[in-house]
Amino acid sequence: MNSFYILFQKEWKESWKDGKLLWLPVVLILLGLIQPISLYYMPQIIDMAGNLPDGAVIDIPKPGGEEVLVSTLSQFGTVGTAIFVFSVMGSIVNERNHGSLSLIMARPVNPIHYIGSKWLAQVLLVLASFTVSYGLAFYYTNLLFGKVGIDRFLLSLSVYSVWIVFVMTVTLFFSALFRHIGGVAGGSITLIAAVSLAGSLFPRFTEWTPDKAKSQASYIIMHGSWDGTFAWMMFSSAGIVFLLFMCTAFVFKRYESY
């Protein structure tokens, strides 16, 4: 367990050295603030763009706070997912290609501790950054639009985090599977996109997939509660994440050389 703690500390130090502790929160904060601010100033933006007939009046109905937060989560579901993949895709493959993994595994390090320390450090960093970003979006939504209950915010934050953890675990798995960043990014995005596409095309048959965490979070914002498939989705998502984690550890143990 001592090796796990040391490796966990190493992950945080490396995140500070490569700037991830700075750029990841900043990028996610900007992404979270774009939606409420752009929606609020949309009439002025259209007016400044020009090309409107003389005397034209811009009258865009002001959306409710719930609608703004749902659209913000939609941004995290597209651009945000790519950022989550980008932030973790080199976590194992870079150490392997640079030779530092050989130095680490030459010591009495349990592969589970190595994978677990990376998973926990990456997930905590991304979830903390997402919480700050989504929290600021919630604040400005309440300030500029209608009031949204704090309970809806906290519940949607917790449920949406399930999707983020799934994305991070998938990317970590491909980082252990491939030796090149391109393969990690391609494999991760392909699998994540396939899960999302299946959820869109076959909603009745994919109510248990982690992709449904996004729609459940939006449902909570709009209605203040979850629907009937919530418990099934949470239980199956936890199982899928655990299975992916164990597959990552298995692939890592099967390395012929580090």
Image (cartoon, rainbow, N blue to C red):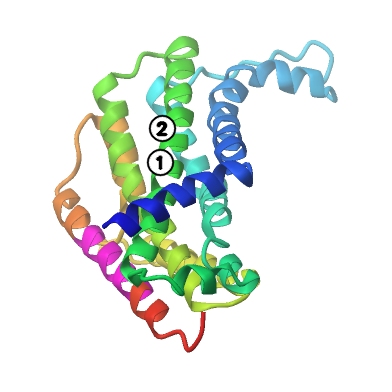
Front position in the image: 139 or 175: 175
Q: In screen coordinates, is 151 left or right of 83?
A: left
Q: Number of labelled discs?
A: 2
Q: Is residue 92 left or right of residue 201?
A: right
- Residue 239's tag is none
- Residues shaded magenta: 236-248
* Residue 72 magenta-highlighted: no
Instruction: Estimate the x, y position of residue 78 in percent, counting from the top left.
Output: 53, 49
In-image side of 7 versus 112 (left or right): right
Kindly tell me whether residue 154 is visible in this rendering: yes
The secondary element bearing badge 2 is classed as helix
Q: Magenta-highlighted stretch: main secondary structure?
A: helix
Look at the image and say whether residue 244 sits in the magenta stretch.
Answer: yes
What residue is pinned by disc 2? 131
Instruction: Look at the picture and state if 1 lies above or below 191.
Output: above
Between 253 and 176, the residue placed more toward the observer is 253
Residue at image mark 1? 127
The type of residue carrying mark 2 is Thr
